[in-house]
Image (cartoon, rainbow, N blue to C red):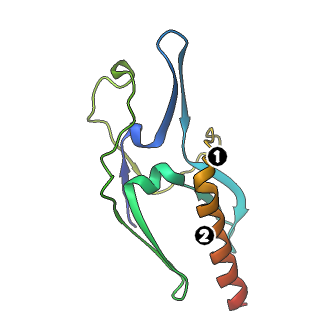
Amino acid sequence: DTVFILTPLQYLWITGDQSTGYICYSVFSPSDSSDSNGNLFWILGDYFLYRYYSIFDILNNRVGFATSISYDWMPTVDSSLFPTSSTTTEVSSIPNRENSTVHRPAMHFSIFALILMVATRYMDSV
C-alpha cells in the first residue's frame, strides 16, 4: 500500500473569518459509483493534485503519482485555527462517506476526462 501524507490545511477548505465564524469542508468527495468489486470511487480533486503529480497510462491501465513541486503550498488561514503545524494525517483509505464536498469547476473537466478514459478502457476490455 502507498500512503499519501497530507496536513489538515492540505485537505480542508476553510471559509469565513473570525467575526462571522469559520466553516471547514473536506475536499475529498465520495461518488455513488463503484467498481466491479463494489468499491466506491472517491474524487480527490485539485487539493490532492496540487500535492501529487499524476500520470494516467490508459494503455497499461495504471495511474502513477509523485510529489508535486507545489506540495508545500498552503492556503492562508487564521493561525488560531491550527495552533501547531506538526499535525499530519496519513490517508490510505477513506471509510467515511459523510464528508462535505467542495466543487471546483476547473477540476470537473479533469475528473470527467479521467472517468471517460477509464470507462473507455473498461469498455474496450469487455
Residue type at numbered disc 2: Leu
Nearer-N-terminus badge (2/1): 1
Relative to residue 116, is residue 14 depicted above or below? Answer: above
Q: Which residue is at 50% across, 9% downward?
A: 19
| Residue designated by label 1 | 97
Residue nearest the viewer, comparing 85 with 120: 120
Question: Where does residue 121 sit, x and y in percent of width and height?
Answer: 65, 84
Cβ–Cβ below 8 Å for labels 2 and 1? no
Residue visible at 70% across and 90% down in the picture: 124
Q: Answer few, some or many: residues within 10 Å of disc 1's Cα (few below 14, many 20 plus, some between 14 and 19).
A: few
Q: Assess disc 2: are there few (<14), some (14-19) or many (≥20) residues with their C-alpha within 10 Å of its C-alpha.
A: some
Q: Residue lying at the far top in this picture: please name it.
A: 19
**Quadrant housing residue 20:** top right
- Total of numbered circles in the picture? 2
- Kind of residue at badge 1: Arg
Residue 109, horizontal then vertical, whole percent: 63, 61
- Horizontally, residue 12 falls left or right of residue 69, namely right
Image quarter of the C terminus: bottom right
Please tell me the numbered disc located at residue 109: none
Element under disc 1: loop
Distance (Cα) linking label 2 and label 1: 21 Å
> Which image quarter holds the N terminus?
bottom left
Query: Is the residue 12 above or below the residue 106 in the image?
Result: above
Image coordinates for residue 112, horizontal then vertical, percent: 66, 64
Label 2: which secondary element: helix
Question: Which percent across, then down, holds residue 29?
Answer: 61, 49
Q: Residue at x 65, y 40 (%)?
A: 98
From the viewer's perspective, is the residue at label 2 or at label 1 nearer? 2
Q: Is residue 94 left or right of residue 64?
A: right
Q: Which mark is residue 114?
A: 2
